[in-house]
Amino acid sequence: MHIIKGNMNAMQYLRILDEHLKAVGQRFCRKQFIMQADIDSKHKSRHATNWISKNKIKTIECLSNSHDISPIEHIFHILKKNLRDRIIRCVEEFERALIEE
């Protein structure tokens, strides 16, 4: 998990791709995996598109409002459900709780 302070922009997204995506994808999916991304502008930025092409990452696009078929939306739902009963008083406690889950 990578926690971002504030709103994510294209350069932060590129840093996440560079520092985490390929290693995590290969760790859990072995040699080849498919990345799902919506059509958000940071996912379609020139830098991100070039990085994905250069690293030979296969992608599949989905609409950003396709909550029923988006794996990340299912993960968010599970996280919300699991965090619902916790008493969280500050951002640091929230980050710790997310990591624990």
Image (tube, rainbow, N blue to C red):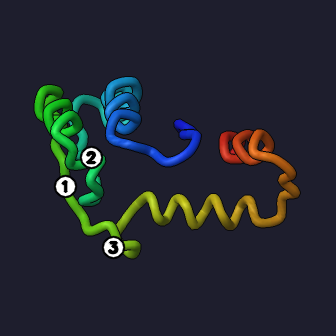
Q: Nearer the viewer, residue 86 or 34?
A: 86
The quarter of the rendered structure image containing the N terminus is top right
Q: Which residue is mark 2?
A: 35
Image position of 63 (left or right of 99):
left
Residue 46 in view of the camera: yes
Mark 2–mark 1 CB contact (< 8 Å): yes
Lower position in the chain sequence, tag 3 or tag 2: 2
Q: Which residue is mark 3?
A: 66
Specify few, some or many for label 3: CA neighbours under 10 Å numbering under 14, 14-19, or 20 or more: few
Say what amino acid the circle numbered 3 marks.
Answer: Ser
Residue 24 in view of the camera: no
Residue in the image at 75% along x and 45% along y:
91
Picture coordinates of residue 75 (x, y %)?
52, 59
Image position of 80 (left or right of 9):
right
Say what amino acid the circle numbered 1 marks.
Answer: Ile
Residue in the image at 82% along x and 47% along y:
90
Picture coordinates of residue 16 (x, y %)?
40, 32
Residue in the image at 54% along x and 40% along y:
4
Q: Which residue is mark 1?
A: 60
